[in-house]
C-alpha cells in the first residue's frame, strides 16, 4: 500500500486560542475646517430677544400648577389666576446672555 501525498497543512491539536473581541484603535479627533454659518445677523438675534422679552412681560406665561405659580410670585413677578408676567430684568439676571457670535 502506498501512502498518499504529504499534507502541507500544519496539524493543530486542540482548540484555537480564544479571542476576547476586536481591539479598536482610538479614532482621530475630528476638526471642523470651516467657520460657522451666520444664519442670523447680530441685529436679527437682538430683535428676536427684544420681542421675546416683550412677550414675557406683556402676555406672560400660562402656568397651571399652583406650586409653580407660587414660586413665580416669590420672585417678584406679576401673577393672575393662571398667567404670570415676567419682567425682562429678572430673566436677564437669571439667564446668561447668548454669545451672538456663536449663533
Image: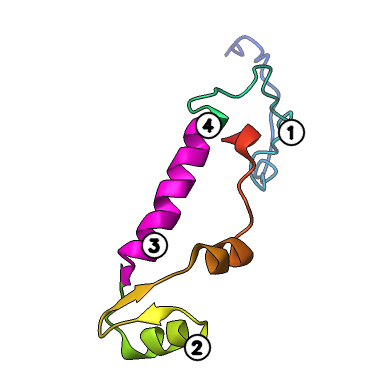
Where is residue 53? Give x, y as percent: 44, 56
Looking at the image, residue 32 lies above or below residue 49 = above
Q: Dots 1 and 2: beta carbons under 8 Å?
A: no
Quadrant housing the C terminus = top right
Dot 4 falls on a residue whose secondary structure is: helix
Residue that badge 1 annotates: 25
Find residue 74 and name its label: 2
Distance (Cα) linking label 4 and label 2: 34 Å
Question: Is residue 57 rendered magenta in the image?
Answer: yes
Q: The magenta stretch spans which residues?
A: 43-61
Where is residue 27? Give x, y as percent: 70, 31
Question: Which residue is pictured at 39% across the width and 62% down the height?
Answer: 56
Would you identify the image quadrant in which residue 6 lies? top right
Q: Dots 3 and 4: beta carbons under 8 Å?
A: no
Mark 3 is surrounded, within 10 Å at the Cα level, by few (under 14), some (14 to 19) or many (20 or more) other residues, namely: some
Q: Nearer the viewer, residue 19 or 38?
A: 38
Distance (Cα) linking label 3 and label 4: 20 Å
> Which tag, 1 or 3, sits closer to the chain's start?
1
Find residue 53 and name its label: none
Where is residue 38? Give x, y as percent: 54, 23
Q: Nearer the viewer, residue 91 or 29?
A: 91
Distance (Cα) linking label 1 and label 4: 46 Å
Where is residue 23? Give x, y as percent: 70, 38
Residue that badge 3 annotates: 56
Distance (Cα) linking label 1 and label 2: 55 Å
Residue that badge 4 annotates: 43
Does 103 sit left or right of 33 as displayed?
left
Amino acid at each position: 500500500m502506498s501512502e498518499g501525498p504529504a499534507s502541507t497543512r500544519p496539524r493543530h491539536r486542540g482548540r484555537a486560542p480564544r479571542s476576547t473581541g476586536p481591539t479598536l484603535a482610538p479614532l482621530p479627533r475630528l476638526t471642523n475646517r470651516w467657520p460657522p454659518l451666520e444664519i442670523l445677523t447680530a441685529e436679527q438675534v437682538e430683535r428676536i430677544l427684544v420681542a421675546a422679552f416683550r412677550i414675557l412681560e406683556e402676555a406672560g406665561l400660562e402656568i397651571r400648577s399652583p406650586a409653580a405659580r407660587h414660586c413665580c410670585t416669590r420672585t417678584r413677578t406679576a401673577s393672575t389666576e393662571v398667567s404670570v408676567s415676567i419682567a425682562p430684568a429678572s430673566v436677564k439676571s437669571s439667564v446668561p446672555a447668548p454669545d451672538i457670535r456663536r449663533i
